[in-house]
Amino acid sequence: MKLKKRSLLAVLAVAQLAAAYPASADASVPDDKSGTVTQEVYEQTATTKSAETKGISQTSQTSQTDAASTETVTGEVTEEQDGTTDPAAGGTGGEQEPTVPGEAQDNQNDPNNPNNPNNQTSAGGKELILYFNSTKMIQDGVTYNAPQPMQVKKGISYVPIRALVDRVGFKVSYDKKTKETVITKGSNELRFKTNSSKYTVNGVSKNMKGTSYQTNGTFMVPLTAITQALEIPYSVDNAGKRVIMNLQTKPVAKFTVGPKEILAGQTTVTYTTEVENAQGEIINERWEGRQDIFDTPGEYTITYAVQDSTGTWSDPYSVKITVVQPNQPPVAMFDTDKGEYKMGELVTIIDQSYDDIDKNEQLTYKWENKQYAYFTPGVHTIRLTVTDRKGLSSTYEHTIHITDETLYVEEDFNKLFIPEGEKFTFTGSVTSRDKINYEFYDEPSTLIRSNSPETVNSEGIVYRETASGDMRFMIHHVNNLNKNVKMYVVATNKNSTPVTLRQDFLGFAGPSPIATAAGKKSVLNYFQSMQDGSKQMSVTLAPGEQKLVMTELSEVRMKQGHVISLYSDMYSDLPIQFDVIMIDEKSDPLKVLPELPILNRDGVHNRGTYPDSTRVIRYSELVGADPQRLVLGDNMDDPNLQGTDPMVGDTTSNTGNFGVLYKITLDRVAPNTLISFNPRGGKYSGYAMVNGTITPIYSLGQVSPGEQAVLYRTGDYEQQVDIILTAAPGSNLPVNLLFTQMPELKQ
């Protein structure tokens, strides 16, 4: 029969109520007989106003069949190879789980089916009455008969599950794989198994007060399991003979609001509604707080309810939304400490820009004619354009007057006032300065420099080495494979005992289309990990085990032409083989590694393994009283490390000493000394750490040989200065550290 959907909850509540029946009724319940199982077929008799229904409160006189909401199960008999019959199809055979009625049986109660002898509707009422120890069920005045009575065994009430389900229009089926009877309604699913005291509710296993069983081919389950799972409302009459179930279900109204961001006065709000458990059509709906456009920012609560054709209203459903102020252009604003300056006098700019959403560090600043000082008299207009993250901008102009009086000439001003991390044009001859003739020693740390082929044209191993103790990796490569790739470092333990690999510091940058940008950022991140210890970690490799290490390298794919750059300090207590590989982004590195070729070096860039790669320089004489320079990476004052290319066995020289960590201590730096950075081999971009502070070697880009970047200034007293440097990949060496006496300050 085609059954109208009803709240599964109502159906199952009956079971709970039956527990009230006296335990003595157990004597009348037949024992479990689960041999041959037959289909559950029950009769129904039209007795709408029979004597049996006298005194029973009816909540509905008629019930309607909604064909669109009816769910049926078709029972088709299929013969199994072992001679048994599919239990879901009905029929007999060996011992099997309970069966589910087929379409033919259900259609007998369809009012549109001529085979329905009583032309009765089903599963359409609001009230269902069950009788203890009886097969009789009354639904809104219509009497139905179940295949077995509601029974009580050992104080537990049991109901024929299929008969109850049919009355409220839920879907029942049989899962042959799990041998479970399944009841579904919407997203709710209950699963029962014969001779089990457990069942599942939406996949969660629960205990029942009794054990399900079969009797005369009918599947019986504890009613409390159903009522508790689905929270079915019911009542028991005063005489304790009947369970009265309220099948009245409220429709459930829901809605969603879009879009995610709602701007006051601008965004047209969309409302997408959803209604469940409605009986018939939705005849009315009610909104509170709904607006198509909200004019004022703030929080709003919107409520929605519906009424179905039975006259029942749903509970109100509410959604809170936040209406935000539309993004406004940032306000560009600044001031200067004075309105009039001498030539060569420091101009202090006070930023007063702000934005309604973004913080100042998230804004983009574009200055025009902004200088630390001006060296021509007259009126100068400074212009600032500020742009927020959404592309809105504003511009502000401020005018200052420069007199014809000179406070500092430009060279003196630059030495005194250009900030650390900024640069100015070099004056004079660098090579005419005296060199600081320093001495050094190298600390043990094996440098593994993977930098050739710098531009990788095919998948393979760009570096392979076995090392132990303190190690430093420098990895710098470009993807030229015409596809997306990833790079990995694979560590292999070829020892017979476990090995612990410790990572102390790591700086990774990229992928980036600009090699110097990746190299510069990797040094910054490397120094930051020294300061905060954020990259410290360890991993243990069992004998023969392979693991990926330095995994930041492979977190992001590399596009064609993109560069990655990495520095990392590691330590292992036993030798470990390291393979640096570039492969297709979708490949598994551990699976493809045995098949990868070792790639040839490119003949231009350097690769190799170099011992003792931490260079310690300590100079105890006075520095800075006269113009001086300290040269690094020239292969004379600072000799190149010598090592080998392990993949071909050649001796190699670390040109430029890339990957070498310089620890420079100047015990006596004269008062009022400017320490600056001047590249000699070409443009340079990187960072230095001076007295524990990380300082950019020009914050906005690269420094050229004709320029010097300010690193540090001593005060009015002699002091010790500690400098840590490592060459940024993509930059050029050699470089000079310049020491210059600054002019006296003027009032």
Image: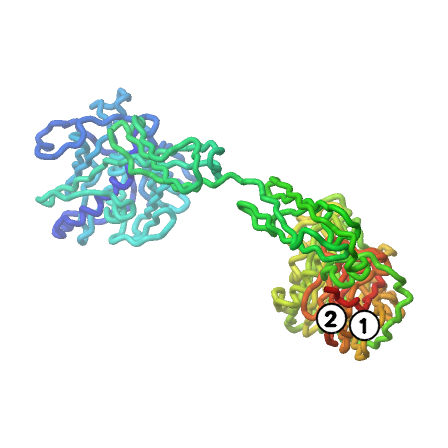
Quarter the C terminus occupies: bottom right
Quarter the N terminus occupies: top left
Position of residue 483 relative to residue 465, above or below, is above
Q: Which disc, if any, is residue 473? A: none
x and y percent of residue 206 in the render?
32, 53
Res. 646 in view: no
N-terminal-most mark, 2 or 1:
1
Res. 197 in view: yes
Badge 2 element: loop
Q: Nearer the viewer, residue 486 or 14?
A: 486
Name which quarter of the figure residue 590 lies in: bottom right
Crowding near the residue tagged with mark 1, few <14, some 14–19, many ≥20 C-alpha atoms within 10 Å: many
Q: Nearer the viewer, residue 387 or 562?
A: 387
Q: Which residue is mark 1?
A: 624
State yes or no: discs 2 and 1 in contact (Cβ < 8 Å). Answer: yes
x and y percent of residue 521 in the render?
70, 57
Position of residue 213 relative to residue 267, above or below, is below
Q: Nearer the viewer, residue 408 or 250?
A: 408
**Which amino acid lies under the numbered mark 1 shown in the image of this protein?**
Gly
Badge 1 element: loop
x and y percent of residue 151 in the render?
18, 46
Crowding near the residue tagged with mark 2, few <14, some 14–19, many ≥20 C-alpha atoms within 10 Å: some
**Which amino acid lies under the numbered mark 2 shown in the image of this protein?**
Thr
Q: Which residue is mark 2?
A: 714
Horizontal relation, residue 654 to residue 87: left or right: right
Horizontal relation, residue 598 to residue 528: left or right: right
Most distant residue in the bottom direction = 620
Name which quarter of the figure residue 688 lies in: bottom right
Mark 2 vs mark 1, CA separation in Å: 10 Å
Horizontal relation, residue 710 to residue 272: left or right: right
Q: Nearer the viewer, residue 551 or 624?
A: 624
Horizontal relation, residue 250 to residue 235: left or right: right
